[in-house]
Image (tube, rainbow, N blue to C red):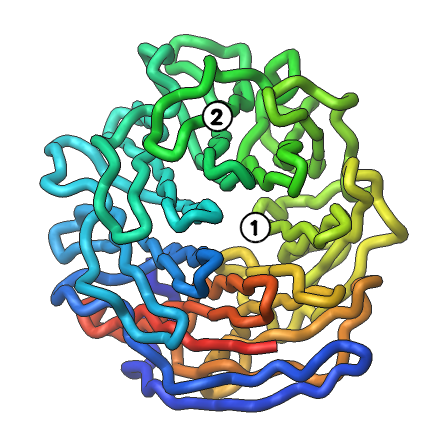
């Protein structure tokens, strides 16, 4: 997993800055960098962060042990940036015979949260699981398969979002080891404690050879917005399309899928999305080949593109490992974070975008080390947020998951 391992061990240093970006407010780094993980011999990766309405945060990540085992870990962090309790495994004790990976998290308004992840084995039987927790971190029941009806599963890359009423909706790609009919994209609603609220439903029909990497968010009125990558024509995906479709709160479609980006995203599955208060969407991704760099696309609430793709940052300073993080900011606009790959050290940086997607001012320098990966961001409506990332070294057991407060 580690790239550039011939480089000397990382030296973690703090680079703090502020960005004035009229008409947006200034972004201020507050407090020191906080190390979230402390279990010896576990390399943190693929971290995600979500914010509760009371200002607290929940961080989840994949932990790679020295034996090669992968487990999903979590830790709560207070609004002041202080860890609450010790980190713990989402599933403990863990049943033998599987590897956990690709975690995602959503926090409901009341503070309950749901974690979803992949569970795979050496025979390519993958299932997607979820588990719900109270705001205190106490499990509200055992882990459960998102798709219990798939008896020969290839269920991959789940995502989850919280609804205003405290329920959750999860989505994932689903196929079968015995089928050559391609992949479906499924979604299912769950109560705050993980109880299913009806059966799984398809996002689009028919199945396609390649449909994967779904994302989901829920609007204030409960409508569901799904996005995913698709290639309908080729058995070797090379011309990905980014599709969007809206559903009502009960899972009924509100129109057909819409292609959110006018052009194909050649090999650019590393994407994320954010939704503003008015429903407008911003997609961000790392592009390659015909159009490279850190790119973005604004879309209306139904996924219809607004204008052409935006170049947020040039290709010469964007690390392609891991997707960029993005969030809507209070009062309009967006904030994007990513890792760089040039210079003696890598950096986690961010940039504020105006509501129309125009970059505002210089990059905000958030953190630096010789190796940094997988930045993610979460910001609340009051402007208080956080950025997390991994700082890696030649000795994986010395790598750290770093948390830093960012206030607008």
Residue 239: tell me if it is visible.
no
Q: Nearer the viewer, residue 382 or 273?
A: 382
Q: Look at the numbered discs 1 and 2 and tell me whether their residues touch, using CB distance below 8 Å.
A: no
59 left or right of 240 in image:
left
| Point 37% across, 75% down: residue | 81
Residue 209 location (% of width, % of height): 58, 21
Q: Give residue 351's quadrant in the image.
A: bottom right
Q: Secondary structure at mark 2?
A: strand
Q: Nearer the viewer, residue 77 or 394?
A: 77
- The label on residue 270 is 1
Disc nearer the start of the sequence (1/2): 2
Q: Quadrant of the C terminus?
A: bottom right
Question: Residue farthest to the right?
Answer: 307
Q: Secondary structure at mark 1?
A: loop
Q: Look at the picture and state if 394 lies above or below 218.
A: below
Residue 342: tell me if it is visible.
yes
Label 1 packing within 10 angstroms: few (<14), some (14-19), many (20+): some
Report which residue position mark 2 lands on: 189
Q: Look at the picture and state if 248 lies above or below 408.
A: above
Residue 14 location (% of width, % of height): 42, 89
Q: Nearer the viewer, residue 109 or 377?
A: 109
93 left or right of 216 in image:
left
Total count of labels: 2
| Point 30% across, 23% down: residue | 125
| Point 78% across, 31% down: residue | 258
């Amino acid at each position: 997993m580690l790239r550039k391992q011939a480089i000397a061990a990382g030296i973690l240093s703090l680079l703090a800055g502020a960005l004035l970006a009229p008409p947006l407010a200034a972004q201020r780094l507050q407090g020191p960098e906080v190390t979230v993980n402390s279990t010896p011999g576990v390399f943190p990766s693929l971290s995600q962060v979500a914010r509760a309405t009371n200002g607290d945060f929940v961080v989840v990540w994949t932990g790679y042990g020295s034996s090669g085992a992968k487990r999903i870990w979590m830790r709560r962090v207070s609004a002041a940036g202080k860890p609450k309790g010790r980190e713990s495994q989402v599933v403990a004790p863990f049943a033998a015979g599987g590897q956990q990976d690709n975690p995602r998290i959503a926090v409901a308004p009341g503070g309950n949260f749901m974690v979803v992840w992949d569970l795979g084995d050496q025979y390519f039987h993958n299932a997607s699981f979820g588990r719900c927790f109270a705001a205190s971190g106490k499990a509200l029941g055992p882990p459960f398969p998102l798709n219990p009806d798939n008896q020969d599963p290839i269920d991959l890359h789940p995502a989850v979002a919280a609804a205003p009423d405290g329920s959750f909706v999860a989505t994932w790609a689903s196929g079968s080891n015995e089928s050559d009919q391609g992949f479906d994209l499924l979604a299912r609603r769950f109560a705050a404690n993980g109880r299913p609220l009806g059966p799984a439903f398809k996002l689009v029909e028919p199945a396609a050879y390649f449909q994967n990497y779904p994302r989901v968010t829920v609007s204030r009125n409960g409508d569901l917005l799904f996005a995913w990558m698709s290639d309908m024509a080729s058995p070797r995906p090379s011309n990905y399309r980014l599709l969007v479709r809206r559903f009502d709160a009960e899972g009924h479609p509100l129109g057909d899928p819409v292609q959110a980006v006018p052009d194909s995203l050649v090999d650019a599955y590393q994407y994320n999305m954010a939704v503003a208060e008015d429903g407008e969407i911003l997609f961000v991704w790392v592009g390659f080949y015909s159009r490279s760099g850190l790119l973005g696309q604004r879309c209306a609430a139904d996924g219809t593109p607004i204008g052409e793709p935006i170049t947020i940052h040039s290709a010469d300073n964007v690390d392609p490992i891991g997707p960029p993080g993005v969030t809507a900011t209070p009062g309009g606009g967006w904030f994007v974070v990513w890792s760089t790959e040039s210079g003696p050290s890598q950096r986690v940086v961010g940039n504020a975008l105006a509501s129309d997607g125009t970059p505002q001012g210089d990059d905000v320098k958030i953190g630096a080390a010789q190796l940094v990966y997988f930045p993610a961001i979460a910001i609340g409506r009051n402007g208080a947020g956080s950025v997390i990332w991994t700082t890696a070294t030649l000795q994986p057991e010395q790598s750290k998951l770093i948390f830093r407060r960012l206030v607008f």
